Amino acid sequence: GIAEKFCVSAEEAGNAKITAVASRDAGRKAEQKKASKWAEKNAPKATAYESYEALLDDDNVHAVYILVPTASRKKWVMSAAAKKKHVLCEKPIAVSLKDAQEMIDACEEHGVQFMDNTMFMHHPRLEWMRQRIDEKSFGKVKHVVSSFTIPFGNEKEWAESNIRMNVDAEPFGALGDLGWYNIRISLWAFDWEMPTAVRCDYLETTAQGVPVTCHAMLSFKDGRSATFDCSFKGALRQWVEIVGENKMLSCDDFVVNQKEDSAEYTIGEGGISDKALTFPKVSTTFAMSGKACKSNVRLIERMSSIVCSIDASGKTAFDQSWLDTSVQTQRIMWALHLSGAAQGKWVDPATV
């Protein structure tokens, strides 16, 4: 699970350690035993608390990772901020744009860093890709197309019991769990420009209305666009193609590496042969390897570095860009959700 993955990542990070873990239901001895058993396996040096409140009262805890269901995140982000704990939060960060903004405002007010757990943002490959698409020879970015699908929704047990299909806990379904990444890579490719309008089709939903398969479009000024699909019922795909005026960039695993210690992307340029008998394409693949490719570790190291610098200075000089990108992504997702609920009506994200 994601909690276990986080423990492995923190163990590899050079500037962080897991000090405490807690169980969800307060006031039950069984919960502390449950937390202790989990800690013994995944974080043996951590203190196990019977409640989240008790963990937040621990002065040895500087930052918290909040991975409760989306419907519960606001409560614990607000509580953590009030206790001066820096916050790493799962995505989507809230059940509404209003709640998300209130969470971010609370972190700003209390001088704590907020960051969402979108790991690929911390991969050095992304910096390399930025250099390529900013080159004059690439041309202006015209279109971004991406997909993120997983097949588990085809399994009856998963579809009936997994929390991602629970409307009360995860109302955005595939759009929030998977589409968040598509939205983020699209915004990144357009250098954080806001789209002028967005639309989304919920092609499959549960009986309670949880989105299972979504197709979406983001429209930008000057005829530029981004499209994506996300689903709980498709073969595992996690690719993106960024189309420039002259060249294209493609990445087959933009969300999570296919290989633990290596990553790559491809730059392509097509052409038309004499008499148009063939359409030849020249492709160059760029690869990197090493520990730096572990974006899950890099995220924790970056978050810890910010937290350490704030705590050392005694000031509230957090990195505002991470708060801004979280709210921007939530805004686009919220607008797409409103569109999906209205059978694909175009929505201006600036007005939601």
Image (cartoon, helix red, strand yellow):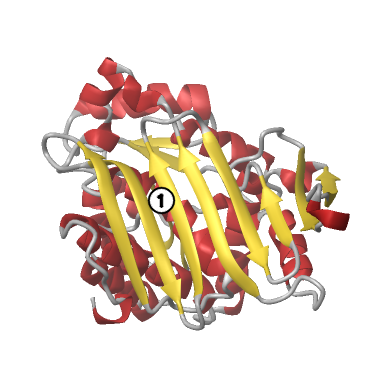
Quadrant of the drawing holding the C terminus: bottom left
* Relative image position of residue 205 (x, y in whole percent): 21, 39
Q: Is residue 167 above or below residue 99?
A: above
Question: Residue sitting at 47 percent across and 82 percent down?
Answer: 221
Q: Residues within 10 Å of mark 1 (few under 14, many from 20)?
A: many
Q: Which one is in front, 183 or 139? A: 139
175 relative to 154, above or below: below
Specify whether residue 60 is in view: no
Q: Residue furthest left?
A: 208
Asked if residue 307 is positioned above or below residue 286 in the image, the reply reads below
Please say whether residue 114 is visible from this viewpoint.
yes
Q: Position of residue 293 (x, y in %)?
A: 74, 45
Query: What residue is at 50 percent from the left and 77 percent from the top?
Result: 223
Tell me the quarter of the picture where residue 29 sits: top left
Q: Residue at x 49, y 68 (%)?
A: 225
The residue singled out by tag 1 in the image is 179
Residue 189: image quadrant is bottom right
* x and y percentages locating residue 18 in the rendered image: 53, 42
In the depicted view, which residue is nearer to us: 145 or 115?
A: 145
Q: Nearer the viewer, residue 269 or 71?
A: 269
Q: Amino acid at mark 1?
A: Gly
Count of labels in the image:
1
Q: Is 258 on the left-hand or right-hand side of 237?
A: right
Quadrant containing the N terminus is: top left
Q: Position of residue 351 (x, y in %)?
A: 25, 81
Answer with left or right where residue 202 lies relative to residue 4.
Answer: left
Which element carries disc 1, helix, strand or loop? helix
User: Which residue is drawn at the image coordinates 78% and 55% (left, top)?
Assistant: 268
